[in-house]
Image (spheres, rainbow, N blue to C red):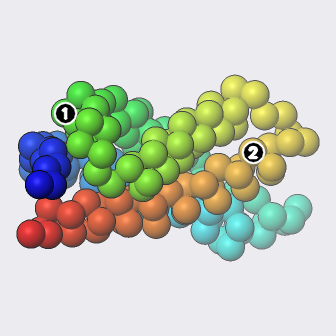
Amino acid sequence: MHTHRHRPHINLRVERWHRRCIYASFAALLLSGAAWLLARYFFRPVGQFGETVNPLEPWSMKLHGAAAMAMLFFIGSLMNAHIRRALKAGRNLATGWGMIGAMALLTASGFGLYYLAGESDRPVWSALHWAIGLAATLLFVAHVVLGRRAVHRP
């Protein structure tokens, strides 16, 4: 006789209001970061003395910083209700750990850009930060899609 333990179903679904706050924070981060990238690298006005700062650059950075604070809050709020339960259930771990790693790297590189980077190494910190941010967007979508598929499997 073959017996196996069946793990009880653990609900990992994030409540609608919580999910919407996370999606909104993520969208604000992505859009403000993309706005900065475009303003910085493609839409710099040329003045009498050469390229100047696009007025969108400082505003997009301010919005990006505010969205980062909101996202950090909501990531922290996922610790008990979602992350701990997912670890216990052993579900969607690859993209989940990937998200945790990406968010940690984005937090560290954002901190580095704001507090540690000098003028000479700022481009390296910046490229690292936005490359991880763009990759994290794909990872986030994969995490949500795979998580939803797991819920709908018989």
Residue at image coords 24%, 28%: 80
Q: Report x, y in % for residue 137.
A: 46, 61
Reply above or below: 11 against 149. Answer: above
Q: Report x, y in % for residue 142.
A: 38, 66
Dividing the picture into quadrants, the one containing residue 95 is bottom left
Q: Report x, y in % for residue 43.
A: 66, 71
**Viewer can see residue 110:** no
Residue type, label 1: Ala
48 sits to left or right of 12: right
Reply above or below: 102 against 41. Answer: above
Q: Secondary structure at mark 2?
A: helix
Residue 125: mark in rendering: 2
Q: Report x, y in % for residue 11.
A: 11, 45
Residue at image coords 19%, 33%: 81
Residue 102: mark in rendering: none
Near mark 1 (Cα within 10 A), the count class, few <14, some 14-19 or many ≥20, is: some
Tell me the distance, in whole angstroms, between the alpha carbons under discs 2 and 1. 33 Å
Dividing the picture into quadrants, the one containing residue 44 is bottom right
Dividing the picture into quadrants, the one containing residue 113 is top right
Residue at image coords 45%, 45%: 97
Residue at image coords 71%, 52%: 128
Q: Secondary structure at mark 1?
A: helix
User: Which one is nearer the viewer's eye here, 11 or 144?
Assistant: 11
User: Which one is nearer the viewer's eye here, 135 or 24?
Assistant: 135
User: Which one is nearer the viewer's eye here, 43 or 2?
Assistant: 2
Mark found first going from the N terminus, 2 or 1:
1
122 sits to left or right of 149: right
85 sits to left or right of 35: left
